[in-house]
Image (cartoon, rainbow, N blue to C red):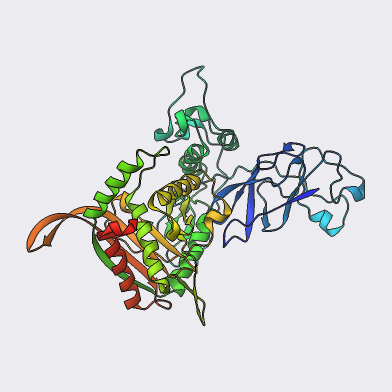
Amino acid sequence: MKTVDMPKMGDTMEEGKILHWIKREGDEVKKGESLAEVETDKVNIEIEAFSSGVLRKILVAEGESAPIGTPIAYIGAVDEPVPGEAATGGGGNGGSGGNGKATKNGKKGQEKPAATRPSAPLLAADPSPVAPALTPAPVATISTPTPVVASSVAASQVMPAPSGERVFISPLARRVAEEHHIDYRQIRGTGPNGRIIKMDVESAVSQAAPAAALATAPAPQSLGMGIDAAEVVEIPLTAMRRTIAKRLTQSMQSAPHFYVTSVIDTSKLGELRAQINAYAATDPNPIKVSINDLILKAVASALLRMPQVNVSFAEDRLLQKKQIHIGVAVALEQGLIVPVLHNADKLGILEIARETRRLADAARTNKLKPEDLSGGTFTVSNLGGFGVDSFTAVINPPESAILAVGTITPTPAVVDGQVVVREQMKVTLSSDHRALDGAVAARFLQEVKRLLEEPFGLLL
């Protein structure tokens, strides 16, 4: 009998919540198949089976949480006794999953049956910067929303399927739609060939739930600070949003942030990118290189030349990392996630482009692996695609620096005494002043600027 334990899927993960079991008790399981979807402090991930057999018993029901390393299920042969049941002479219960507490304590007849599927909506959260938390006033309770009907779905999500026409939807998306009483035939799919995927359904749920909550809200009650309950919609925090709030508040309160900004001429960078993409188009596996891919390469090269920036502050010492693992901030509907580009200094530009695409796609489809989220030593956050000119980013602990990248803008500049229009980009380095002096931060940004303004050195 093989034990399935709650895996550790990230440096900060302490426990995971079972959102739903993909396999049920009695189902045949093959090694590598998805067993369950787990909500962590960063992302929802489908965990895989590490052995083949039959899912004999579920120990942690849907909607329940368990610490990392805790047994959550058993996989074995059909006639193999289940631990804890052999002592009582009982076999499998034919479809219900206990929480394992009664067996652990040695008590008979106290195993808790598996809970039915929860109907808690997966709501999109506001990804705005986290401010230091205030002590909240008493919060009025809002009654449970009624089932969300298709007519509540935002118009932007609605594209009714013609009568009798087959609707293409992934099994996972279908389950989520059924749990939240969403008519998936009214949802426009964004997957391949218009296929409805899980993110499409979650988006419909997040847009429909506030209207349902308002429709069932009780009489106005005070939330404190002059706010009435009738004037707001309470959106429960996801595990990811709670972690973002905790870690970024901790970062701002514990790490004295120091900022340096530089304006970079990207004219030559754009020319190099065009040449690389022209070459990459002839590759059997073509890939388009982005400006951000070139920025990641420049940052990796600068960290290799200045390892004193690749550190973490540890109270009475600095921990200088031997590897260069760059976090790449990806904005999702439910919050910000930072998958990691490992050994970035050892990757060529095309390799960086392929890996960053894989990480971004995996993040948006909940396919990231635990190793994709761990080990970061420096982070790059690029909001240029949103038209942001410049911004300051909050350091991602335990790292000591993060580079904030703005959009590229045609700007008048003085070159050789003449005013000309140049493609320019503003970047701001946020650094932990406990670990990095201002001069070190400035020299590092100067090196990044040099590499991006004379980018052919990135090919060497």
Picture residue at 51% right of the left edge, 64% below the top: 246
Residue farthest toward the front in the current orientation of the protein: 460
Q: Is residue 52 left or right of residue 292?
A: right
Quadrant of image for the C terminus: bottom left
Residue farthest toward the bottom in the current orientation of the protein: 316
Picture residue at 47% right of the left edge, 28% below the top: 186
Q: Position of residue 225 (x, y in %)?
A: 43, 63
Residue farthest toward the left in the current orientation of the protein: 418
In the image, residue 52 above or below residue 301: above
Q: Tell which of 450 and 146 is nearer to you.
A: 450
Q: Is residue 399 left or right of residue 171?
A: left
Picture residue at 32% right of the left edge, 51% below the top: 291
Q: Position of residue 110 (x, y in %)?
A: 84, 51
One can see residue 235 in this view: yes
Picture residue at 89% right of the left edge, 44% below the top: 90
Q: Tell which of 198 and 226 is nearer to you.
A: 198
Q: Position of residue 316 (x, y in %)?
A: 52, 82
